[in-house]
Image (cartoon, coloured by chain):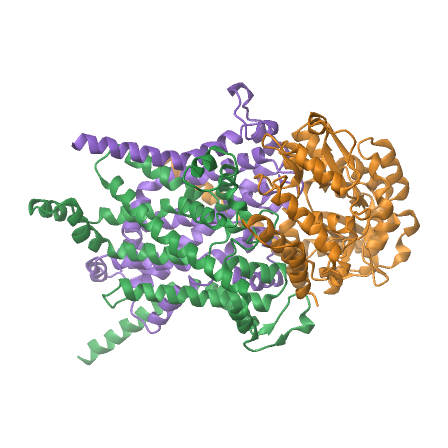
Chain colours: A purple, B green, C orange
Amino acid sequence: MRTLSKTLLYILLGLLSLIFLIPIFYALYTSLLPLQYVDKIVPITKINLNNYITLFQKTEVVQWFFNTAIVTVLTVLGNVVLNTMAGYALAKFNFPGKKLIFMLVLASMMIPFQLIITPMYIMIAKLHLHNTLTGLIVPFMYNCLYIFMARQFFLTIPKEIEEAATIDGLNKAKTFFKIIVPLSGNIITTIVILNFTSTWNSYLVPATFISDKSKYLLVVGLRTVNDQFFTRPNLVMAGVILTTLPVLLLFLRYQKYFVQGIATTGIKG
Amino acid sequence: MLKSVRSKSRSKREETITAYLFLLPVILLWLIWFLIPTIQSFVISFYQYSFVQVSQNHFVGFQNFIRALTEVDFYQALKHTLIIAFVAVPIQSVIALLLAMALNLNIKFKGGFRTIFYTPYVVSSIAVTTVFMYFFVMGTPITKFFSLFGIDNTTWYADFNLALPFIVMIYVWQQIGFYIVVFLAGLQTIPAELNESAKVDGADSFRRFFYITLPMLKPVVFLNLTFGMIQALQVFDQVAAVAQNQPLGSPAGATSTLVSYFYVQSFKNWDMGYGSAVAILLFIVIFIITMVQKKLLDDSGEE
Amino acid sequence: MKRFSKAMSLLVSSCLVVSMGLSGCGSSDSQQASDKSAAATSSSAPVKEVTYKVGYFSEQYTSTYEKACEGIEKVLPGVKVEPMMYPTDKDYWDNLPAQVAAGTAPDLAAMTNEKYLDFISNGLMLPLNESVIDLSKIQKQAVDAWKIDGKLYGIPLTAQPEAFIINMDMWNKAGLKELPKTLDDVKVAAKALTKDGVKGICIPDAEFHLTQYALAFGGGWGFGKTIDTPQNAQALQYLIDMFKDGVAITPKQAGLSWDGEVFAKGKCAMSTGGTWYIATLKEMAPDINYKMIPLPKGMTNGSTLHSIAIGVLKTAKDAEVAAKIAAYLVRDEVQQTVVKDAGAPPSSIAISDEYFANDPIVKDLKPVLAYAQPFAYPAAGQKFSEALIKGFDEAIYAKDSKKTGADIVKDVQALFK
């Protein structure tokens, strides 16, 4: 009975995995095909890496990759530092205006981003930050969602830890950096993975703020393989695979901390 | 005694200063890059406003809001937005919870399954939609399969009635991994002893789920529903991908959402004032739904 | 794990260094430029170099615009021109207005005569001094398309007639002989050609294609004044009927992004299109045997004149200089590149004649130029196309829709009174 139900469970999970994997395999398969074979099943001999080679030869994919890496790493860095600090203040300090700030954090999550992109662009342009990677990084170094999550995480850290630190003569700031941060691997991983994913895949902002081809990010640049009158699904899919790989590797490497991180964040209302 | 009061107030002041120092960078960034543009957009929503002909912009009071509330297309977009949210969020939450419970059992390849289910979440939504669009074209095995259930063998995203379900489907497929991870995390915080002792008391698995697991998971359920709603009410990428070179919301507005409607008005028709009014109405919708959810789910009375 | 985190930290620190360099660049760029110009003034040549940018989209035209920008300093000393590509046409049209508002738009832009009225009526494009170019050497229809209220707003680079494309393998296989002369012939042929999963005709639900049929029925949009006319209603009804008969398909229904792909994949036997098909078919379906002919007659001969032109935007540093640059960018040499690299019909009368004479695929299209007309969409072109497509989609995508061509033109006209 037990083994039977377990076998059934494996079969079910296996089938579901197929639903999740087939589109990804299809993308991989298409990325290996010459254009005229797209949508067709071909013998393995027709498969090759030419699309990837084309991307590397005909586009500035390496440059775009570096741009994306710089923007993503710095944005994530900012988000980790600033959001955890803010989240900690909202969780553990008592000060006038705390409630108001927390309400504003929540409300900010509900404003559709598209609403502010044009005023934002005009400000960026006035500050001459358009067409710079700085313009893609600085305004996005914080995120109210992550502040919210960080706050929830720090609420779960027992008071006693901080009290002990105070007795040892550490002030509040030192307590955070010396004692709390080393305990916060989980929330940091969570912010890193979520923020990395969204920054790496972002399109609207880089496509609006950047007009210089050499400063494109990967997702934007790879769009240029489709001409107005020419779609190349095989090249597009090669681009998708190239773009997805780094994020997937990051998740694979750190997923354990990620799950634990989430476990300690949203859970305490 | 006086001394200790004074030192207390001093430490109080120190705490306030430290708190604001910790918050300072975020507050500055937020003021410049969020509050100012938001206020600008808010003000714009009371104007007949175009970025391209600044000289003709003028104050119109609530006219943009009234126009939205009397326009058929606005209600169509609102309807689709609510449908997506109220169909996608329950489906993704229930399936995610079931899968998370399965993955929380003592089974092999746990990590492998988890990774597989999470993978779509790291791919860009436009790319995901593009791939799915290859699958749901008239005559492919998938549409043939669905035609066994009485659904027309047609190109789903080009069909008036199937385009919206198509978007909901992709949306759930892509988002579910995230919610699985969140539920899984929540399940891991439930002490195993609780279940064990209930088992000893003779509670069957059905009862254990409703009397132990679900109540213990309440905060996670709250997080998933709230966050899920906020996200689902702002669906845009999938709609944009499905439209291809055609007007957003294609075919014939069958997939228009409030965000896509806002986008068309602001960036295609250059009617920034009206577009901003629509976005503010969307904000109000999200706000109300979130508050109602909070009231319904959160009886502890605290934040 | 350790190695990974080491690598990660190395990456982070190196990125930090690079980004500092970058953000440094952002602010020092202008400084460097002024340094350079200071150096230049102190030396013998007192010319300050000014860079103008030309916006465009579609990789297909990159070589053309790169070529076009070469050698400008010989004609206009001290001027430099650089092409500025946008990732997609969507980004181009959506971002240009905000960029003009923010002052970050290019000085010049490659525009088409489809939705240009939005830009012109809002003052985003500036009228040009006609003396910068000899207009008599350019196709008259293209010049007319770019003249609004007597003022010239763009210098045409291409002058493109529309075409009707037929897959001859399918045509012959279906036992059809003479090529269609009228749209009634097309309807009959579409029925005969529909079989084995192939539809007779691809009718994209896009304003460009619908306009061709409207013109062939003697209609047209008249810049918004003549939308609700029996001719337009009849044209749309003609198309809707073909969908009802099951002989037509849209690119969307075929799961493809545009009609050329539908044709290349052999999912339709006929389609409206243009010379841009040639390059696509060469790469995607080199074996297809096809013909390009003028769109068969409805009530009359109908075709639009599509023209890419270089216009001057409000953001131009010096409108007079920019107009001269625009004229330079469409010189003969560039038009030859347009023919060679992008396969588009040039605007120069002489080169155009050569183009139609030398390429056997397009030779039948030359007479179309004589009767090709501007698109004549209303000034709010985007709003118009949205409404038109929405109405048409409701008629063809919703099952059992009762919507007629007459209903559509009436609804759309109501928006443009």
Q: Identify whether B299 is placed above or below C339.
A: below
Tag count: 0
Task: Give left or right: position of B137 versus B18.
Answer: right
User: Measured from the top left, where is residue B212 in percent x and y?
Assistant: 17, 52
Q: Is residue C382 visible?
A: no
Compare residues A93 and C310 and report the one nearer the observer: C310
Task: Give left or right: position of B10 versus A85.
Answer: left
Q: Quadrant of residue C296?
A: top right
Q: Residue at the spot x=71%, y=35% of the render?
A: C189
Compare residues C325 and C341 and report the one nearer the observer: C341
Picture quarter with the N terminus of chain B: bottom left
Residue lying farthest left? B201
Compare residues B124 and A67 and report the one nearer the observer: B124
Picture quarter with the C terminus of chain B: bottom left
Q: Residue at the spot x=66%, y=65% of the render?
A: C415
Q: Identify whether B148 is placed above or below C157.
A: above
User: Measured from the top left, where is residue C123 in percent x and y?
Assistant: 74, 64
User: Measured from the top left, where is residue C172 in percent x and y?
Assistant: 72, 26
Q: Residue at the spot x=31%, y=73% of the render?
A: B13
User: Measured from the top left, where is residue B192 in percent x and y?
Assistant: 15, 45
Q: Is residue B76 visible?
A: yes
Compare residues B253 and A193 and report the one nearer the observer: B253
Q: Residue at the spot x=36%, y=71% of the render?
A: A100
